Image (spheres, rainbow, N blue to C red):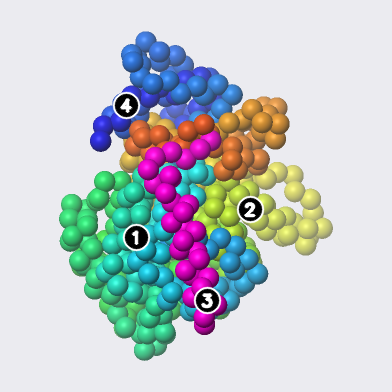
Amino acid sequence: MTQPDLLIRGGYIATLDPSMGDLPVGDVLIRYGVIAAIGTDLSAEAGSARVIDARGRLVIPGMVDSHRHLWQGALGGATGKSSLLGYSAEIIGQVAPLYTPDDMYAGTLWGALQALNAGITTVADWSHNLPTPDHADANVRALEDSGIRGIFLFGGPGADAAAFFGPDAQRHPDDARRVRDELFPNGNRGRLTMGLALRGPAFSNEANTRADFDYARALGLPMSVHVGMAGFPHSVDTLARLDLLGADVNYAHANQLSPHEFDLIAETGGSIAISPAVDMLMALGAHPATGEVLRRGIPAGLAVDTTTSTGSDLFSEMRIALAAERSRANAHLTSQHEAATEVSLDHRDMLELATAGGARAWWMDDQIGTLAIGKQADVAIVDMRSPHLDGFSDTVATAVMGAGPSDVETVVVAGEILKENGLLVGPAAETARELMLQSRRRIRAGIAAL
């Protein structure tokens, strides 16, 4: 469906495009779902375009969540007191098998709307609860109905977790081939593309790890794999020994990788998804991989991972990532009884990770991640007029340190407005909450019967 032209007028435009920089007062013109112009006064060019008043607002590229289990959208806060092992036992071991295809649809739809509500316009959806073709189809349908841009990462069966993980595990479900052929015959499905969510050496044997990677490459799909989590060492070294590293692999977490393993990822063109809150709260590692990644120039983005243990937005992840990395640097200095005279990372670095970095991590930076002429019109507009965001000078720093989902006033994906005046809009937004509540009641009843 062709979207009407839009003129975002009079906002502080943080393009994240190095060639353009910031416009303290500027306009963004959107035509046919694409950014047509960026400038200081585009009224003459806009013609009959619908005007979005952005005065007193910050206009940024739509954010990119580089690793998230959207099917868990109805389970917010369920494992707030759990480590990774506790989460695995509770959510993967007990809750996942209770999910019907209807629950898969409701949870994924709600999770996608949580992301859109927070200004996230693209999500790498690491879907690892697909015991039947109907579950997979429901997952894709929910993503499509939400309007979000996404990468559907076909993962494991969930309900058969005991048979999928461990030394006697089965190979990756071949239903992924059907999904690619039927739902993504041209490589994309509207705003969606497809990849594979693989177990990797930490959660499988070497034979199946090789088979999984070969399968993804035979299908011509990018892949994502968990690595570098506490208690699961040497994953990247193992992949290197098996000659499986490559520029088509996204590595999630990476907290506990050795310097050599980070070097291997950099040398082979891989990317990394950093989940600062989950990485620390669920004891995946002492610190997120932020500094190691940025020092090597590895393409990387920020991620929520799961709302069962943390929030649903990347503003929080930006703050946690910045504080954690500065804390790590400070710890070294204070151990030498020294004080820091400068800081190596700042707020703009974090916004870069949440936007352009995430786009690079999923090989989409030619389409999204910055505000630039010719790119897809994925935009988030943050209302900066509230007391907690009425900053003194640096608008970007103020937003990174203070904003949250409720401050995101407008969200646009491919020129389509999906959040307006602070509220989600569209058919999916009207029905999603009731579907989620129905699903949640079914799941709670199932848990009670265990």
Residue 49 drawn at (x, y percent): 35, 19
Quadrant of the rendered image containing residue 171: bottom left
* Disc number placed over residue 4 in the picture, else none: 4
Mark 1 vs mark 3, foreground winner is: 3
The overriding secondary structure of the stretch rendered in magenta is helix
Tell me if label 3 and label 2 are in contact, CB under 8 Å: no
Q: Residues within 10 Å of mark 2 (few under 14, many from 20)?
A: some
Counting residues from the start of the chain, the first of labels 3 and 4 encountered is: 4
Q: Which residue is mark 1?
A: 139
Q: Which residue is mark 2?
A: 320
Residue 402 drawn at (x, y percent): 66, 40
Can residue 43 be seen by looking at this rendering? yes
Q: Residues within 10 Å of mark 3 (few under 14, many from 20)?
A: few
Q: Which residue is mark 3?
A: 447
Q: CA distance from mark 2 to mark 1?
A: 30 Å
Picture residue at 55% right of the left edge, 73% below the top: 87
Query: Vertically, is 367 above or below 136?
Result: above
The residue type indicated by label 2 comes to: Ile
Q: Residues within 10 Å of mark 1 (few under 14, many from 20)?
A: many
Mark 3 vs mark 4, foreground winner is: 3
Counting residues from the start of the chain, the first of labels 2 and 4 encountered is: 4
Counting residues from the start of the chain, the first of labels 4 and 1 encountered is: 4
Can residue 299 be seen by looking at this rendering? no
Picture residue at 35% right of the left edge, 26% below the top: 30
Q: CA distance from mark 3 to mark 4?
A: 46 Å
Counting residues from the start of the chain, the first of labels 1 and 3 encountered is: 1
The residue type indicated by label 4 comes to: Pro
Magenta part of the chain: 422-450
Q: Nearer the viewer, residue 56 or 134?
A: 134
